[in-house]
Amino acid sequence: MLTAGFDWNDLGTWGSLYEQLPKNEQENVLINSNQIIEINSSKNIVRTSKNKLVVLEGLKNYIIIETDDELVIVSKEKEQDIKLIRKAAIEKFGKQFE
């Protein structure tokens, strides 16, 4: 057995992913795009389809997730509610949102 010293983060949440990824000058993280206009916006994590232009105005500490059939915008403070929101969407609109 050898002693090892290293940090661990299981990346199980958007917040933990935000902490690990490189941030731009406004402390925003972009996944799949590098084209952004930020006006009074910082500390957000944005996941979009590839090469999409992202425009943020007045957002701080948000999680913004775009998929083919969903757009989710949630305050980082409410990150744990994403599972409940997803469940509500499935119950209301069907299993295609699983």
Image (cartoon, grey):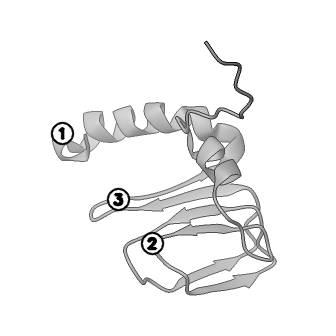
Can you identify the residue that label 1 sits on? 95
Q: Is 64 left or right of 69, judged from the image as shown? A: right
Residue plotted at (80% across, 77% down):
25
Observer-side mark, 2 or 3, equals: 2
* 3D distance between C-alphas at marks 3 and 1: 13 Å
The amino acid type of the residue labelled 3 equals Glu
**Place of residue 47 in the rendered image (x, y in percent of width and height, measured from the top left):** 49, 64
Front residue of this view, candidates 66 and 14: 14
Q: Position of residue 98 (x, y in %)?
A: 25, 40
Q: How many marks?
A: 3
Residue underneath mark 2:
32
> Considering the numbered disc 1 on the image, is that residue within a helix, a strand or a loop?
helix
Does the residue at mark 3 contact the one at mark 1 (Cβ under 8 Å)? no
As drawn, is 88 to the left or to the right of 78? left
Residue at image location 67% in from the left, 64% down from the top: 22
Query: Looking at the rendering, which quadrant does residue 2 occupy?
Result: top right
Q: Residues within 10 Å of mark 2 (few under 14, many from 20)?
A: few
Q: Position of residue 85 (x, y in %)?
A: 45, 38
Q: Identify the residue position indicated by label 3 in the image.
A: 70
For marks 3 and 1 on the same chain, the one whose residue lies earlier in the sequence? 3
Q: Amino acid at mark 2?
A: Asn
Residue shown at 18%/39% (left/top)?
95
* Secondary structure found at label 2: loop
In the image as oriented, which residue stretches furthest toward the front?
A: 1
| Circle nearer the N terminus (2, 3) | 2
Farthest top residue in view? 1
Q: Is residue 48 above or below residue 70?
A: below
Residue 4 relative to residue 31: left or right: right
